[in-house]
Image: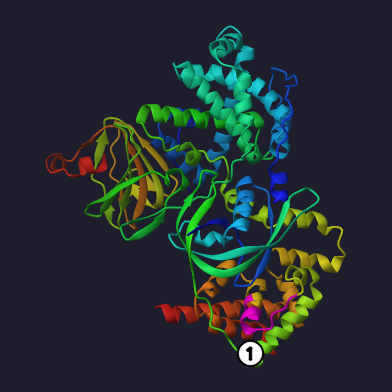
């Protein structure tokens, strides 16, 4: 299947870091994260790595006497940055805080493993990187071809917009149903409500 | 309204990840119910992140980047970068599986912070039901404590600390009335005797065995190990 | 026998078709496995985490890539199945064993179902995209027509779940009659 190979193919060209000031520039960091998320941009990742790696190693060295463990924090933190960059939302916080959160979580789980012998990775639940609303809906919406369809909606004649919206969400809108049945919207709304109430009463009678 | 909040020090420990899992989870659950502490925590996170990552530039004398790099010179950063970016998979959004616990004939959906923690079997004592959270933190004991309507915990003090986070319902003690989200941290200098008119569920963290102040309890006191 | 599981808020009854956009590596893998082997299952959020999940077992009927090179897949529900013993593989893809569920008996047209059919045909006539998803095919049987109506109706998914159960056809008939056939309120 040709198509799958294409979709899974990756670019393998070399990646070189661009220069990055030592001071934190959250706008630039956010741009790098966004490039990683949308383009799997290895050069952007190398730049971020160059900026954060010495800092993370330095901070971790104070928590773990074993240098291997400090390196493990670095590897795990930066690997999460690479794999989770699409979770970062510039509207919800600063890029440096996001990287710090990942480092803190990795450190917490590793210390917990050392101290209590528990490998439960509790940090993901105590400090979730994805908030609940995202967790429930985000993946699903995209796979329903919503973004693709919404993007092309503007090019459609007005009367077709509703149809496309409805069809991709597997639902007609109440307005469409009303129009199709030639009934006032209010009538359709109350019919829908009454029909469901009736169904629930019937099921209640059967199940109780 | 929530009136009892974690102290600034506890929030700071939460931000840096230096508190035990039990207290971190308690603060996470409190923050879910308390927008003002959640906001404060977010601000402290930003400050902590800036400070941690800028520190090297502001204090070049402490442990500088050169020596940090020297420590890690035994292996190659390029190899690490190569290994990381070789992984094509992006992380998927985790599918949560909310866990329900039945205590005192009521079903409770556990907050996310503790939903994967293993629960011990239920112990019952009068109107109290307790389930231990198997966090494995040694002397720090963490439990879910359910009080049925009209139940109370005998008056006691603490050698260490006792944290009570009210997750659901309400209770009273001599100092006042508490609602879901209240974060009540007591040290060894105070006594209390919570009673719940309509029942409640609490998350408790205790780091030392309890002392009971009422004479009878001292003698006949199954409650001590029960609460600790 | 196990099949991959795709959690998705799509209410899909037997013979229903829906269009998916697939970009996550694990779900690309799922599509390639499903195309070669035995399809996959769409499961509603409402069932996730339960020991037995009702799901739509689907086969791939069409695929294409859009301008951005993203895979667009049309899938058709073969049957409703009960999923058990789910687990995640090393690629974070959910798998489960499946058992086909019985859904509705084969119904014969009556005056009501003929009206449902006419209303649906005229809706397909006005909605070219919907019709094209079915390649212009309209199956004029009461089962097909009622299933498509239930998928399309603007009801909350939680209110549709009951129609995944066996022998729910009489309730479906009642609900559709109340909604589509009443002359006045």
Q: Within the magenta stretch, is there residue C140?
A: yes
Kindly indicate the quadrant of the structure image that contains residue B161.
Answer: top left
Q: In the figure, A128 relative to A69: above or below?
A: below
Q: Position of residue A94 (x, y in %)?
A: 66, 32
Residue appearing at x 26%, y 42% in the figure: B227
* Coloring basis for residues: rainbow
Location of the C terminus of chain A by quadrant is bottom left
Q: Residue furthest bottom?
A: C111
What span is colored magenta in the figure?
Answer: C137-147
Q: Position of residue A156 (x, y in %)?
A: 86, 62
Residue situated in front as seen by the camera: A120 or C67:
C67
Disc 1: CA contacts within 10 A as few (<14), some (14-19) or many (>=20): some
Q: In the figure, A20 relative to B129: above or below?
A: above
Q: Within the magenta stretch, is there residue B91?
A: no
Q: In the figure, C108 relative to C20: above or below?
A: below
Q: Which residue is mark 1?
A: C109
Q: Which subunit holds the residue at mark 1?
A: C
């Amino acid at each position: 299947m040709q198509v799958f190979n294409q979709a899974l193919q990756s670019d393998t060209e070399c990646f070189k870091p661009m220069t990055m000031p030592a001071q934190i520039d959250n706008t630039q960091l956010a741009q790098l994260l966004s490039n990683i998320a949308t383009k799997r941009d290895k050069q952007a990742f190398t730049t971020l790595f160059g900026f954060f790696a010495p800092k993370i190693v330095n901070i971790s060295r104070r928590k773990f006497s074993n240098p291997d463990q400090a390196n493990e924090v670095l590897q795990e933190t930066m690997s999460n940055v690479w794999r989770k960059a699409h979770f970062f939302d510039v509207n919800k916080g600063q890029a440096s805080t996001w990287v710090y959160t990942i480092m803190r979580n990795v450190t917490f789980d590793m210390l917990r493993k050392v101290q209590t012998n528990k490998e439960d990775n509790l940090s993901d639940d105590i400090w979730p990187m994805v908030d609940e609303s995202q967790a429930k809906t985000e993946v699903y919406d995209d796979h329903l071809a919503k973004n693709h369809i919404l993007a092309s909606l503007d090019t459609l004649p007005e009367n077709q917009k509703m149809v496309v919206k409805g069809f991709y969400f597997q639902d007609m809108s109440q307005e469409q149903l009303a129009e199709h049945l030639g009934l006032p919207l209010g009538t359709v709304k109350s019919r829908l409500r009454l029909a469901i109430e009736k169904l629930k009463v019937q099921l209640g009678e059967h199940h109780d | 309204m929530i009136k009892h909040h974690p102290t600034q020090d506890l929030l700071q420990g939460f931000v840096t990840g230096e508190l035990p899992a039990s207290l971190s989870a308690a603060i996470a659950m409190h923050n879910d119910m308390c927008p003002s502490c959640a906001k404060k925590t977010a601000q402290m996170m930003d400050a902590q992140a800036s400070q941690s990552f800028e520190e090297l530039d502001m204090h070049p004398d402490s442990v500088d980047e050169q020596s940090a790099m020297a420590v890690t010179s035994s292996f190659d950063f390029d190899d690490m970068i190569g290994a990381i970016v070789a992984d094509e998979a992006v992380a998927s959004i985790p599918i949560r599986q909310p866990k329900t616990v039945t205590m005192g004939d009521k079903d409770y959906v556990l907050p996310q912070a503790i939903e994967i923690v293993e629960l011990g079997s239920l112990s019952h004592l009068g109107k109290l039901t307790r389930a231990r959270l198997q966090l494995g933190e040694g002397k720090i004991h963490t439990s879910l404590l359910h009080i049925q309507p009209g139940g109370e915990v005998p008056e006691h003090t603490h050698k260490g600390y006792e944290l009570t986070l009210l997750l659901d319902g309400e209770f009273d003690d001599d100092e006042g009335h508490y609602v879901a989200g209240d974060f009540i941290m007591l040290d060894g200098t105070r006594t209390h005797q919570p009673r719940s008119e309509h029942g409640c569920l609490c998350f408790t963290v205790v780091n030392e065995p309890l002392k009971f102040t009422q004479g009878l309890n001292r003698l006949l006191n199954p409650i001590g190990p029960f609460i600790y | 026998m196990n099949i991959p599981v795709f959690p998705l808020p799509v209410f899909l009854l037997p013979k229903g078709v829906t269009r998916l956009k697939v970009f996550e590596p694990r779900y690309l893998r799922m599509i390639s496995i499903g195309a070669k082997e035995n399809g996959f299952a769409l499961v509603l959020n409402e069932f996730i985490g339960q020991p037995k999940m009702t799901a739509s077992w689907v086969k791939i009927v069409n695929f294409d890539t859009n301008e951005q090179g993203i895979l667009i897949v049309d899938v058709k529900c073969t049957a409703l199945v009960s999923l058990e013993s789910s687990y995640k593989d090393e690629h974070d893809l959910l798998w489960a064993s499946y058992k086909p569920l019985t859904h509705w008996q084969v119904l014969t047209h009556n005056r009501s179902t003929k009206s449902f059919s006419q209303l649906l045909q005229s809706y397909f006539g006005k909605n070219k995209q919907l019709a094209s998803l079915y390649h212009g095919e309209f199956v004029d049987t009461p089962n097909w027509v009622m299933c498509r109506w239930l998928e399309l109706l603007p009801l909350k998914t939680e209110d549709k779940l009951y129609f995944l159960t066996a022998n729910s056809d009489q309730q479906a008939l009642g609900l559709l009659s109340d909604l589509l056939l009443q002359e006045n309120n």
